[in-house]
Amino acid sequence: MSMDGVLRLYFGESNLPTPDYIKEAAVRALQDGYTFYTENAGLPSLRRAIAENYQRLQAVELDPASEIVVTASGVQALNLGIRCALDPGDEALALTPAWPNGSSIIMMANATVHQIPHPLCGDRYRVDFDALEAAVTPRTRLLLYTSPSNPLGWVATEEEQQGLLDFARRHGLWLVADEVYDRLYYAGARLGDPVPSILRKATRQDAVMVVHSFSKSYCMTGWRLGWLVARRDLAARATDMNEFIVSHAPTFAQKAGETALAEGEGTLLEMLERLKQNRDLCLRALKRMNGVTVPKPDGAFYLFPRIEGLRDSFAFCRRLLEETQVGLAPGVAFGAGGEGSVRICYAAERSILEPAMARLTKFLNAGG
Ligand SMILES: Cc1ncc(COP(=O)(O)O)c(C=O)c1O
């Protein structure tokens, strides 16, 4: 990170700043006195706005008073949800390769995580239901998956979602769906359509939690604002527990979040157009490189090419960085199934992506 002149494609964020209308909403909120504590579950007005958003985008009805907890980021939602569901000594399953924080939070809850890799079948990642069944023990309490996936860009199909829900019901597990990238979706009927949430399939009685964030859809990574949707008993527990962690997300940021939800569609659509073009540009380049297999991802802003013969993705990324000044994330960082690949975040400008792809091509074609 201290090297100069690096083409940085290793971060998991867009290089776009937060749009002005959101920043202005935060300034207005500060001036209007939103500088005091709020409820531990977040401002009722923001929870209502989140519920309206689910109604509008997903045709899902939620009770803002009892089924939504505003959190200080997606990672905090994950933390609250997991810690409320697991006791020390419990076991959890996590579909990987995945953003490593989920598995780490499970371990911080003094539980054990079993990582179940997504197999690559032809040009699509899938869910290995046989491996899931084989990994369940009497102590298994929870299954965590991410769709759209970081780092794969994989999006669970309707059948896969139903299969995961049935599996969780059959074994009495909490199903935790990390849906923070649901708006970054390129395979809907129209650009801007979200990935259908697991909440469309779940009932109010199901042990289901959805983790969400303002970070990715609204370029608000530094604001630390997200939410958890959960069955009301768990949402109540998460609300109580929040008191002892951060109490609540920053008040003026919550007000800005309301504005993001209400006015964000235009800028989101512009970003999606750009991301889709970036994805296609990188895919075209990767497909021409020696020994590279890369499924076309339907969501998020990552590509996860597998490189033939690659045994140490960390050493590969280090050499690539030192010799070409291109910064990628090593696949091994994303858990079981990640070694042998690298992660490219294509949410950068074309002026960064184009030379990065050219240098990677040269590096690989010269034998990597
Ligand atoms: C899959 C996934 N979930 C959750 C998060 C957390 O986002 P934040 O804590 O910024 O809201 C990230 C961030 O990279 C992510 O990739």
Image (tube, helix red, strand yellow):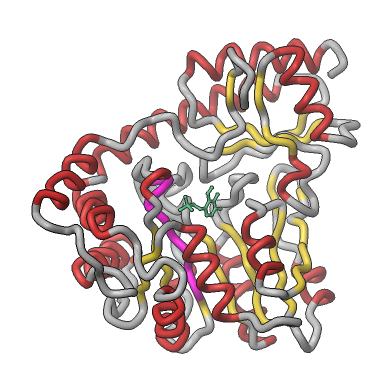
Q: Nearer the viewer, residue 109 or 102?
A: 109
Which of 187/203 is in front? Answer: 203
Decide whether residue 211 is among the magenta residues: yes
Most extreme residue toward the left is: 32
In the image, taking residue 122 as reference, residue 57 lies left or right, namely left
Picture coordinates of residue 302, whole percent (x, y): 58, 38
Question: Looking at the picture, how far across and down is residue 328, in whole percent?
Answer: 67, 29
> Quadrant of the rendered structure where residue 280 is?
top right
Examine the rendered structure and indicate whether residue 3 appears above or below residue 43.
above
Residue in view at x 40 percent, y 75 percent: 243
Q: Is residue 281 visible?
A: yes
Q: Quadrant of the N terminus?
A: top right
Query: At which x and y percent is residue 177?
Result: 54, 66
Is 350 one of the magenta-colored residues? Answer: no
* Residue 138, x across and y down, in percent: 78, 88
146 over 274 or under it: above or below:
below
Q: Horizontal placement of 288 versus 144: left or right?
A: right
Q: Would residue 221 appear left or right of 149 to someone viewing this image?
A: left
Residue 190 visible in the picture:
no
Number of marks: 0
Q: Which residues are magenta?
A: 209-217
Quadrant of the frame with the C terminus: top right
The residue shown at (59%, 45%) is 153
**Residue positioned 41% across, 72% down in the render:** 229
* Residue 97 versus residue 17 in the image, above or below: below
Q: Quadrant of residue 65?
A: bottom left
Residue at the (44%, 83%) spot, across then down? 231
Q: Nearer the viewer, residue 25 or 196?
A: 25
